[in-house]
Image: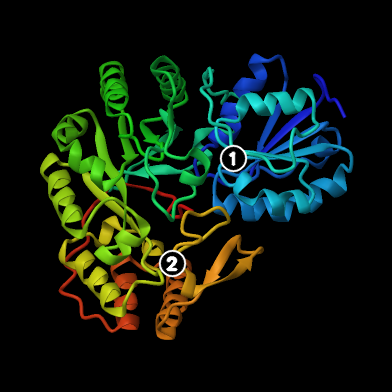
Amino acid sequence: MTSGPGNVLLLSCYELGRRPLGLAVPLAFLKRSGFSARGIDLVVEPLDEAAVRGADFVGISVPMHTALRIALQLLPRIRALNPSCHICLYGLYATLNAELLLARGADSVLSGECEEALVERVVSSEPRERQPRPFRVRLDFPVPERAQLPALERYVHLDRGDGVHVLVEAIETTRGCLHLCRHCPIPPIYEGRFFVVPRETVLADIRQAVREGAHHVDFVDPDFLNGPGHALAIVRAMHREFPELTFDFTAKVEHLLRHRGILKELADSGCLFIVTAVESLSDRVLEELDKGHSQADVLEVLDATRRAGIGFRPTFVPFTPWTTLGDHRALLRWIAQERLVDDVEPVQLALRLLVPPGSLLLGRPALSPHLRSLDPGALTYRWDHPDPEMDSLQRASQKLVENAMVEGWSHRQTLAGLAELAGAKLPDLGAPKPTPRLTEAWFC
């Protein structure tokens, strides 16, 4: 089937509560190629069934695990509404799960730097191969097309910590990652490469965000400091043009350690907080995940960010096959001792290691004794902890966190509840402290 310049519909299932780049970027590529495509963000908009019926090509963005699970539920509905359209799933998790997606009714899957390939699929919907490989090519990036997306007011806000909420726009300056952390979904797709979005494209995107009312930029790169010179040039230019604009970013512990000399300038330029994947304080677990840092490095970075006046927001994978009960208790105590209770989202303290298809953990001798079969519904390989009590603790912790979110518990109440489950004695948690944070807590 050739759709030519026919009806193109792109759907986004979930992007952390942000306005989806998984729509804005491909819409810009399609517009530049002469296609009048429509994007629908299913998080804040209903599915337009008439648009699905009239589409020649339906693209579904799956940049993350949660989005893919939603897309799997969506696939049969799309196919029932339009049996003849070409359905393409694109994004980080697409080729990792290609076999499953093609079996469930997708016609093609795309990952990596795939926007030009997406345009090619629109022009000629026949997939090139049934075992697709990720694209690792340099693209000529247009400015993301955000005009037809819902207003910023409908997305994640910045809670400054003082009761004031401001509008946020998600901006990317690089894609991919230099590193090969074994539990991360990025290395199987990018194999240690990253790609720069040109500075002027990024700045033009920031300008249009400010025009729409954004007062805070959420740099959503997998690691903002993969290209530190590029990142710093963008921050300096942004601060000169919009001195009141604040921002946050994500970076590895080892990058923050290596580039600690620029932290004060980043703070002076508007950086409110940094998200970093600490994952664990156990050096054994960190070694198995190949994180590239140690517990001592985490302590050093925490001190460096505090000296610079930047918030430190760690993320964790607290339950792995190698995590002991002592490790878990120590993590909960450390969060309390370091007065990080308000900087750690409770959901982070109940997460279980995901092992998706294509994971670099597969085949590792340390994981093999614990590994079970692939669960296609959960999109992960199952594993058992050598101590069944740890699996029980994870399930109980997850249930507690879910209930706490529904019932509106404070971070302190939730941490205390998790500590009680684990039998961990916590120091005095002190009074709550105002801390800037985004209003969407989930991340996977």
- In front of the other: 311 or 317: 317
Q: Position of residue 125 (x, y in %)?
A: 80, 30
Mark 1: secondary structure: loop
The label number, if any, that marks residue 166 in the structure image: none
Res 176 quadrant in image: top left
Of badges 1 and 2, the one in the foreground is 2
**What residue type is disc 1 on?**
Gly
> Residue at image x 74%, y 28%?
121
Q: How is the image coloured?
A: rainbow
On screen, residue 333 versus residue 358, left or right, reads left
Q: What is the number of the mark on residue 91?
A: 1
157 up-or-down from 195: above or below: below
Point out the image quarter for the N terminus.
top right
- Identify the residue at image location x=76%, y=28%: 8
Q: Residue 75 in the image: x percent, y percent?
A: 76, 50
* Mark 1 closeness class: few <14, some 14–19, many ≥20 residues within 10 Å: many
Q: Nearer the viewer, residue 263 or 248?
A: 263
Query: Residue 70 in the image: x percent, y percent?
Result: 65, 53
Q: Earlier in the sequence, mark 1 or mark 2?
A: 1
Q: Which residue is mark 2?
A: 365
Q: Say how many tags the image has.
A: 2
Is disc 2 surrounded by few (<14), some (14 to 19) or many (20+) residues within 10 Å?
Answer: few
Mark 2: amino acid: Pro
Res. 112 visible in picture: yes
Q: Nearer the viewer, residue 300 or 49?
A: 300
Q: Name the one closer to the observer, 31 or 98.
A: 98
Q: Is 129 placed above or below 283 here?
A: above
Q: Secondary structure at mark 2?
A: loop
Residue at x 22% of width, y 61% of height: 432
Using the rendered view, name the quadrant where residue 110 is placed: top right
- In the displayed structure, 332 sits above or below 304; it is below
